[in-house]
Image: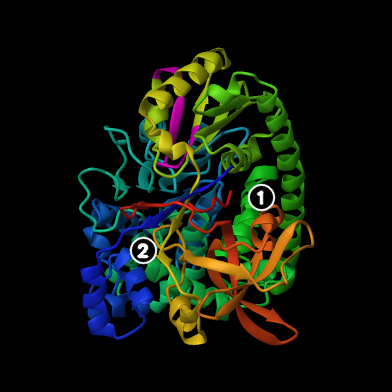
């Protein structure tokens, strides 16, 4: 699809004010103001986050005092505590985090992850019965539980208390757990609402360490897990998440746990790791355990205490991930064939597709692939254990959770976020759901959201692109939602005569501006844009800036996002959130 270029508006007075305070390149100041940074002190916090100083008091979270009191009572009474988590990356890292903390000083603790296919998402009746059978009287649920009203009540009847640590959006009525830790509950005044599930678990450990007068470094050593969860779950990397991700990545780069180190080595990531490395390489392999086999494999890898066994477990996840890739590729091709043979599909505002034989473990990935191709709110459905299960993904700016909620009378359960959700229903309701969901979206979505957009941070002259500029730019990391890698637009460029299509349809060029400054660029899968470059006419390029290392020589280059003939229309809008990738 042809993409619309949208330039983010910024208050130029604020840019000038910040420039007077910092005396750095004005484009850098513009990028900072876009991120809500307007003063020297805010800039200092952004560029130099301090771990303990910039984290919020965990007891600001509603029910944290109750959670700590209940855990303390369980430990003093030698009760058996079960750490219960979801089967995705956020859930498995959270389970590893909390279990590892307890195991250091408390023997009566174990962990449990539901089977994706037999039990489904979240707190299951089977899991509760397993806990009862094995004598557990306290369950700490991580990255799930906020909607488990019936099963939490069932556990209470069996004499089992729940502490829920979740970050998903709750219903109006909360489960009657002993404590519910979720910043998104309406009566919670915690200053930051966008922690990952593992992040909520980390705050619980912060509170426990604070109460027991344990040194902060005791839990700080586990921040590599928190960073993986933040990247994998696509939560905004701002505020507290930025601090946690910053120090978690530092841990991941300098002294990762054996399990993560094995994945790093196995995939040849012998460089400074970034959020993108987690999103596209590490997280899918951790996720593959729950998708293709048993999520406990991922937890065992993350808890590995010895390099040899960690390498063996990492190899098993690598094999699962290869199987996953083959399956999701086949399903994606089949889905595209079905959709493009449907004459009515072109008129719909959604992509909703159902095939009972598809593998439940990969439908979220397929939904993401279909979003990339058709750019519509998307739900992929399959049959699992007699129920239809679905995975939903949205386009930037549209709340798919609310749209699904409008169809809740047809569903057995649903949950998730603005941009990603899961649901289950009886097969007899599929056709009605598909029709209703498309109607709800058609009546509520802004048509402009169905056109893919590239959100440009700033126009730039190639003369500004210097090593000094790039050194400042790289300090904006870690990049992710809420702080994406800046996209620049350079106008009125011409080819110096070296452009070509290389490899598998990649465009390589050297572009020059009238000022005489030139810059190399690479556009992956953009061979079709060669016509704009090679005809001698001027063109505009939007791009991110990166380093290219070739034969030991490092240079800056454009990673090209799009090319248009010079004079292309660029709309200007207020800054809006953008979802640039989905790791699933």
Q: Is residue 379 above or below residue 265?
A: above
Estimate the spatial distance between the alpha carbons at disc 2 and disc 1, rounded to whole Å: 29 Å
242 left or right of 505 in image: left
Number of numbered discs on residues: 2
Q: Left or right: 85 with respect to 584?
A: left
Give coordinates of residue 10: x percent, y percent. Answer: 29, 62
Percent from the top left, x then y, of residue 303? Answer: 59, 64
Q: Residues within 10 Å of mark 2 (few under 14, many from 20)?
A: many
> Which is nearer the N-term, disc 2 or disc 1?
2
Determine whether the residue tagged by mark 1 lies in a helix, strand or loop: helix
Q: Name the side, left or right, on which 556 lies relative to 507.
A: left
Where does the magenta region start and end?
Answer: 409-422
Q: Is residue 412 magenta?
A: yes
Q: Nearer the viewer, residue 330 or 424?
A: 330
Which residue: 62% across, 82% down? Answer: 555
Residue carrying label 1: 289
Q: Which mark is residue 238?
A: 2
* Residue 300 colored in magenta in the image: no
Task: Evaluate whether residue 18 shows in this view.
Answer: yes
Disc 1 crowd, CA 10 A, few/some/many (<14, 14-19, 20+): many
């Amino acid at each position: 699809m042809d993409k619309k270029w949208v330039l983010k508006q910024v208050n130029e007075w604020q840019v000038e004010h910040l420039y007077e305070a910092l005396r750095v390149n004005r484009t850098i100041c513009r990028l900072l103001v876009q991120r809500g940074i307007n003063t020297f002190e805010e800039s200092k916090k952004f560029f130099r986050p301090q771990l303990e100083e910039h984290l919020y008091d965990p007891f600001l979270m509603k029910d944290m005092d109750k959670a700590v009191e209940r855990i303390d009572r369980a430990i003093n009474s030698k009760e058996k505590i079960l750490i219960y988590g979801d089967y995705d990356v956020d859930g498995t890292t959270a389970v590893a985090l909390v279990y590892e903390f307890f195991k250091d000083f408390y023997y009566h603790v174990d962990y449990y992850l539901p089977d994706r296919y037999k039990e489904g998402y979240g707190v299951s009746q089977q899991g509760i019965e397993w806990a009862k059978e094995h004598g557990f009287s306290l369950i700490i649920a991580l990255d799930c539980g906020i909607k488990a009203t019936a099963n939490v009540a069932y556990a209470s009847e069996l004499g089992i208390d729940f502490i829920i640590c979740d970050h998903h959006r709750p219903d109006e009525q909360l489960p009657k757990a002993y404590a519910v830790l979720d910043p998104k509950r309406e009566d919670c005044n915690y200053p930051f609402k966008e922690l990952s599930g593992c992040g909520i678990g980390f705050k619980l450990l912060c509170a426990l360490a604070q109460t027991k007068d344990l040194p902060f470094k005791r839990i700080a050593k586990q921040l590599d897990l928190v960073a993986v969860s933040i990247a994998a779950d696509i939560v905004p990397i701002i505020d507290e998440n930025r601090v946690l991700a910053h120090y978690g990545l530092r841990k991941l780069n300098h002294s990762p746990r054996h399990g993560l180190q094995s994945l790093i080595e196995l995939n040849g990531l012998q460089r400074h790791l970034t959020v993108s490395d987690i999103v596209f390489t590490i997280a899918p392999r951790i996720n593959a355990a729950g998708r293709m086999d048993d999520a406990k494999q991922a937890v065992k890898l993350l808890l590995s205490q010895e390099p040899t066994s960690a390498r063996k477990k990492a190899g098993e996840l690598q094999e699962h991930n290869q199987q996953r890739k083959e399956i999701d590729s086949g399903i994606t091709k089949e889905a595209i064939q079905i959709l493009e043979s449907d004459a009515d599909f072109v008129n719909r505002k959604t992509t909703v597709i159902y095939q009972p034989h598809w593998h439940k473990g990969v439908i979220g990935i397929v939904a993401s692939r279909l979003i990339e191709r058709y750019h519509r709110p998307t739900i992929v459905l399959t049959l699992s254990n007699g129920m239809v299960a679905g995975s939903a993904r949205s386009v930037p700016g549209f709340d798919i959770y609310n749209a699904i909620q409008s169809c809740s009378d047809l569903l057995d359960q649903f949950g998730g976020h603005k941009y990603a959700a899961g649901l289950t229903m009886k097969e007899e309701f599929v056709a009605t759901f598909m029709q209703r969901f498309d109607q709800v979206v058609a009546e509520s979505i802004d048509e402009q959201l169905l056109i893919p957009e590239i959100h440009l941070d700033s126009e730039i002259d190639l003369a500004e692109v210097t090593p000094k500029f790039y050194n400042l730019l790289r300090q904006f990391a870690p990049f992710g939602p809420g702080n994406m890698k800046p996209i620049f637009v350079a106008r009125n460029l011409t080819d110096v005569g070296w452009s070509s299509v290389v490899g598998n349809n990649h465009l390589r060029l050297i572009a020059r501006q009238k000022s005489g400054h030139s810059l190399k660029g690479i556009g992956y899968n953009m061979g079709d844009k060669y016509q704009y470059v090679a005809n001698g006419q001027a063109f505009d390029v939007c791009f991110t800036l990166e380093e290219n290392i070739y034969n030991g020589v490092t240079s800056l280059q454009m990673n090209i996002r799009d090319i248009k003939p010079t004079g292309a229309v660029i709309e200007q809008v207020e800054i809006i959130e953008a979802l640039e990738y989905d790791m699933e």
